[in-house]
Image (cartoon, helix red, strand yellow):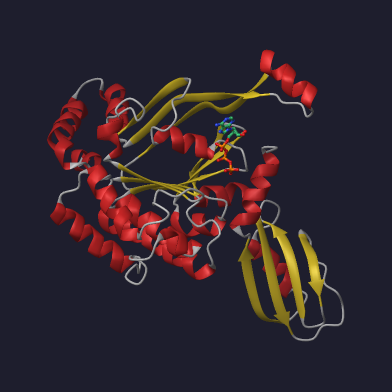
Amino acid sequence: MAVSAFCCGDFIPSSKFNLDSVCRVVVYFSPCHSQYTNKIWRYRKLITLEGISKTFLVAKRQPGIRHAVKSLFHREYTAVDALQDISFSIAPGEIVGYIGPNGAGKSTTIKVMSGILVPDRGACVIDGFTPWKDRVPFVKNIGVVFGQRSQLWWDVPVLDSFELLRDIYDVPEAQYKETLTLLVEALDLGAIIHTPVRQLSLGQRMRCEIAASLLHSPRILFLDEPTIGLDAVSKIAVRQFIKKINKEKGVTVILTTHDMNDIEALASRILLIGKGKLLYDGSVQGLRSRFGTKRTITADYHENGKPLHIPGAELLSWTPERAILGVDTEQVMISEAITRLSAQVELLDVAVETQPIEDIIVQMYKEYRL
Ligand SMILES: Nc1ncnc2c1ncn2[C@@H]1O[C@H](COP(=O)(O)OP(=O)(O)OP(=O)(O)O)[C@@H](O)[C@H]1O
């Protein structure tokens, strides 16, 4: 019983399955079980970052010709600590939202994880590879989309870019054709695949970028602001597609975004980074219960001439038939507030709204002084 409970859970890559299952059984029956359980647990993680730090040296430049000439001989630099001791791990099949204010270090982390940038300190192991050391085998495992940059060739039809990428990743012809057919259908690319990239709208290009990042069927997808600048319909299409490949293909997704609707729609786990430091790692639900304690109660009732006074609740608006109340659940339980309300008016309808995730994030940024 205990063994089966221990074995079930995350997807285990087939090539590692035997070793992994044998290890787990051996470890479970070993006398120093807990010590080894930690190591095995880490082994089962697809992505592990430990103590990653990165500092950029930015040349100081003063305006004016005199300073420009001076800087030719003597340059001063400012150190920007983009990442400070970042550690986390991600299991196969997770969708993780990586959030934080501007300049927090999100893109820098994605660049480290995708092997574009070498950190100053720390370790990063993704599916057994160190991204910046094992670049050639590693990139076959990952797809990357930078919302503000393109991996497609500007002047040629989208399909030509896809074929070039097929050659770069050395994707077998049959596999390429099958994947392309699926992507064209799922992302509705049929009408635009023969159009040069420069003639596409932002939303059309973004769908093509996502397809391009998946042509080689990677297990991990890094998405850096994939919905930036998209209209509501395109955003929904991109979100649905991300959900689909996660569910059906088990693709692990790490997503940076400023759009909290992306987070609500997709991520079950959030990593919050601020000023290069990891500040929160937990579920969206955990975030709500820790920071989202405010509720709004809208009450409709039989006409009542007197403004309400509900102890523990703030009266946000009032008419003789409707009141809107703000309640902090840390002070008063919702059920208690409604009981107090019904003691004063004859209720017809009551609606309770939770705080939008956007407000909760703003509150978090305030709390952490970001
Ligand atoms: N190549 C670089 N040279 C110098 N400084 C850099 C470089 N790249 C990033 N930085 C600095 O590192 C910090 C983190 O930048 P990063 O792009 O990772 O932030 P971000 O969280 O992705 O921000 P945004 O949400 O605005 O995209 C910033 O202060 C930025 O100015």
Q: Residue furthest top?
A: 73
Q: Is residue 249 above or below residue 42?
A: below
Q: Quadrant of residue 124?
A: top left
Quarter of the picture containing the N terminus is top left
Residue 137, percent from left and from top: 25, 33
Looking at this view, is 176 or 310 the one in front? 176
Residue 92 horizontal side relative to residue 347, left or right: left
Q: Residue at x 62, y 42 (%)?
A: 102
Camera-nearest residue between 366 and 249: 249
Q: Quadrant of ligand 1?
A: top right
Residue 185: x and y in percent read 29, 68
Q: Is residue 216 visible?
A: no
Q: Residue at x 15, y 49 (%)?
A: 172
User: Which picture quadrant has residue 41?
Assistant: top left
Q: Residue at x 54, y 59 (%)?
A: 261
Residue 124 appearing in the image: yes
Residue in the image at 20% along x and 32% along y: 24
- Outermost residue toward the right in this view: 306
In front of the other: 330 or 258: 258
* Quarter of the picture holding the C terminus: top right
Image vertical order of residue 289 relative to residue 61, above or below: below
Number of numbered tags placed on the structure image: 0
Q: Report whether 135 appears left or right of 257.
A: left
Residue 171 relative to residue 118: left or right = left
Image spot of residue 13 (x, y percent): 20, 41
Can you say whether 267 is above or below 319 in the image? above
State the image coordinates of residue 189 (x, y, percent, origin top left).
Answer: 34, 67
